[in-house]
Amino acid sequence: MLANEQVIDGRCERCGSEVGKRNLSQWFFRITDYADRLLDDMATLESWPERVLTMQRNWIGRSHGAEVVFRVDGADVEVPVFTTRPDTLFGATFFVLAPEHPLIDDLVRGTPQEAAVREYVRRTEGETEAERLAEDRPKSGVATGRTVVNPVNGESIPVWVSDYVLMGYGTGAIMAVPAHDERDHAFATTFGLQIRPVVVPADGDVDVSAAAYTAHGADDRMVNSGRFDGRPADEALPEIIAWLEETGRGKPTTAYRLRDWLVSRQRYWGAPIPVVECPTCGLVPVPESDLPVVLPDVRDYAPKGRSPLAAAEEWRRVPCPTCGGEALRETDTMDTFVDSSWYFIRYVDADRDDVPWVREHVDGWLPVDQYIGGVEHAILHLLYARFFTKVLHDAGLIGFTEPFANLFTQGMIYRDGAKMSKSKGNVVAPDDYVRRYGADTLRLFTLFMGPPDQDKSWTDGGIAGCHRFLERLWRLVADVAAVTDGPARPTIAEPGPLPEALEVLRKTHWAVAKVSDDIERRLMFNTAIAACMELLNTVERARPTLADDPTGRDVLRFATGTLVALVQPFAPHLAEEAWEHLGGTRLWTETWPVAEERFLVADTYECVVQVNGKVRDRVTLDRSLSRDDVLAAARDLPKVRAHLDGRTVVKEIVVPDKLVNLVVR
RNA sequence: GCCGGAGUGGUGGAACUGGUAGACGCGCCGGACUCAAAAUCCGGUAGGGGAGACCCUGUGCGGGUUCGAUUCCCGCCUCCGGCACCA
């Protein structure tokens, strides 16, 4: 019913009910075939957040090592194991099979241990996932009474069965090296098995009776390892792998933590898996001309351990696409993550009903330039979508191999530790705040709280401040509309005589540049909103003066109209109303304001003057001054002079239009 | 345990490319308006010293590079997130 990724602490990530085990034949996507490409292509995802890439990397969990074949004593059976530490092969003192290992039956049949082993296997099968993964769980296991031969030294070592070995990773069997693996060490200690060190640090022996020696010192040497004795461990490792390969007892291998993607769901809502089961032909895919398979109408949608579709008898019965005989449809439906893995491709051609999409259209629009989603999708949706894209590319259906060129992950909002999300019933109920302050205030505040990629804790405090800002903006608009007229945002050719007019013009153009950049490039809505607040403060301060002058009134209108336009993305309702109040019609059809270069740069700047790196004074200087003039002006400042008195200037640093630093001794 | 991310005032956060630390907001303090309160407006608000002009200290801790470090490098601490019996 669920994929590995959808089980959190042994519970369903959606509904929280306990996950149980049942044997079912189900459908998988072979995502493991793409493990290497999913990993390696991450190098091309330069702008993806590091944490997402890391999570995917961990999830795929590629590790290089070797497969080593052990032969069962007294039987013509070979059991391969996977190890990342072939250099510790000589230290293998026992061997462990996962309880689900298919070989167990044959190994114990008719032996005195058969009953005990079967009992143990039965017990572990009954355990829930949560029980089996519980932390600090004491090791359990049972001896089979059988032995296998260690290929490197011919030694016979006992075979045990234990649930600390997972059937789903590697080969479901391990060579146990208690001297150099913590888990094997714990097991050996529990059952009194031999612990033999084979890799030791250069400075002498290490006590492996208390704990495993798992470090990889650069000077580690081999001991108890036959002809490798005394060799540096890091040199011996590749030699042992080469030797295993030459003698046919092993080979280099790569193992992955990633499992195949279980897509079968025994639910109604989901795309039916388009397969027909025919008594004569077996499993037959539904021909393309009959796709898509559409869900039947059913009375009862509730899952009851088998798919609700199984009850739709008429829908199930179809002629076999191959032989035409009586056959039955597959009744599993697909995981809904399957749909979200390619919806963005379908969006490009959403109104077609003959084909899902036309390649030329899709290649023209995709990959998605900027994808935005929550971090919670880091390893589910985003990994699946990448996988689908590669599969569709390999099938020649699209021309690109990664779906999302740039990824931005927004943080989550928490209150009292619970996340604010659709699926968790919105702990911070927006409705209350919408009722109290309106949707504009809520939206503005949500964006003002901080950078959108960070998690946030909701606090009621600040929202009133955002509401106050919008009220002040509204009052400004009303005041300006009352004392001026003309277009909502007039064109300003010259600032006129008032210094306030120039200041307001500069601030307005500064805000346009800042807000545009914050929205488009930086995705920092909090600082964009702060810039709007600054502009409001400046305009409000200058308002009485500007209102008394004809050009000033134009500037006032211009600044106010611009401010309204800049606020529009964050508070659209109020902005539209305000725009109309200023005499405009539809703000959302206007073009975005553009900052004028001539108002962005002033003739003067405030030069910071440091002595030995410490700020001692500031002075307003003309931009046109030469380096020498700047230095002279700086040195002439009384406060600076006091710090230079009786000392020698050994270095003068001038950062143009910014600061001067005088280094004295 | 492994892997990521982050530590800045009372508080959310800002400082984008190594160049004025604390923008903007909240809170708090003082003032104006008011019979009073609310709302609104004005001023103040990193810490310490000083009557004051000013001075010193300060971006988790300890070092380093640099004329100059919240920003770069090395070593630690703490918190958050992901994975976790993965051989």
Image (spheres, coloured by chain):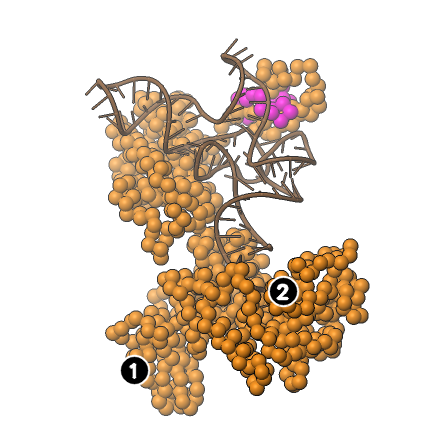
Nearer the observer, A97 or B50: A97
Q: Which residue is mark 1?
A: A313
| Residue at the image position 33 percent from the left and 52 percent from the top | A426
Chain ID, mark 1:
A
Residue A612 lies in magenta, yes or no?
Answer: yes
Tell me the tag on residue A189. Answer: 2
Chain A rendering hue: orange
| Residue at the image position 38 percent from the left and 64 percent from the top | A17
Percent x, y of residue B6: 52, 43
Element carrying mark 2: helix
Do circles 1 and 2 both sit on a common chain? yes
Element carrying mark 1: helix
Q: Earlier in the sequence, mark 1 or mark 2?
A: 2
| Residue at the image position 43 percent from the left and 77 percent from the top | A24
Give above or below for A64 relative to A244: above
Give above or below for A559 relative to B1: above
Chain B rendering hue: brown
Give the magenta-colored segment's residue range: A610-632
Percent x, y of residue A136: 53, 60
Residue A162 lies in magenta, yes or no?
Answer: no
Percent x, y of residue A522: 48, 44
Quadrant of the frame with the C terminus of chain A: top right
Say which of marks 1 and 2 sits in front. 2
User: Given contact means CB atoms under 8 Å apart, are the residues at marks 1 and 2 in contact?
Assistant: no
Nearer the observer, A221 or A445: A221
Quadrant of the frame with the N terminus of chain A: bottom left
